[in-house]
Amino acid sequence: MQTLAHWTGAGGPGPWILFFPLIWAALVAACVLLLRRTVLRGRRGPWQRRRYAAPGTESPLDLLDRRFAQGEIDEDEFWRRTSVLAESSRERHAERAGGGR
């Protein structure tokens, strides 16, 4: 243990001894962040094949986005339906908040 304390001239490892634990800590932190982003939150990693959702499992906003992107509805229709969905969502949240008291 005395050798590690002598950073100069005595043949100790020098200040580089502090560098390697920092590398390991950065590696562990990167692995944890990668796992949190992909596995724990249910997202697919770049190595997994993307599967398409069943037709009934799309959210209404996802369905509107897809239909707008495919040209099935125009911009005015898209914004009108989006505002209706947002309003009904606000009403549902208000009912839940008021009904739970």
Image (cartoon, grey):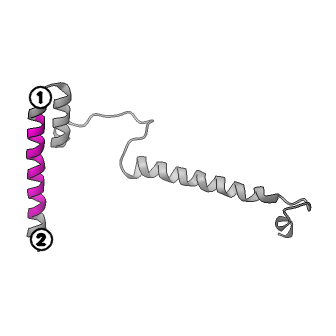
Tell whether position 7 is magenta: no
Seen at 10% across and 45% down, the residue is: 83
Q: Which residues are magenta?
A: 78-95
Q: Nearer the viewer, residue 16 or 29?
A: 16
Tag nearer the camera, 1 or 2:
1
Furthest-right residue in this view: 10
As drawn, 67 above or below 6: above
Give the percent coordinates (x, y) of residue 22: 65, 56
Residue under numbered circle 1 = 74
Task: Identify whether 54 is placed above or below 100.
Answer: above
Q: Assign a secondary structure to mark 2.
A: loop
Residue 20 visible, this angle: yes
Count of residue discs: 2
- Which SS type dominates the magenta stretch? helix
> From where the camera sits, is residue 55 visible?
no
What distance separates the C-alpha of mark 1 from that of mark 2? 39 Å
Side of 33 where 68 appears, left or right: left
Which circle marks residue 100 in the picture?
Answer: 2
Query: Is 90 colored magenta in this rendering?
Result: yes
Q: Which amino acid, by three-letter code, is at mark 1?
A: Asp
Asked if residue 26 lies left or right of residue 17, the reply is left
Identity of the amino acid at label 2? Answer: Gly
Neighbour class for label 2 at 10 Å: few (<14), some, many (≥20)?
A: few
Q: Position of residue 26 (x, y in %)?
A: 59, 53
Q: Position of residue 6 (x, y in %)?
A: 86, 66
Q: Taking 28 as reference, is 59 left or right?
A: left
| Mark 1: secondary structure | loop
Q: What is the quadrant of residue 29 in the picture?
A: bottom right
Residue at the limit of the structure toward the front, as seen here? 76
Q: Residues within 10 Å of mark 1 (few under 14, many from 20)?
A: few
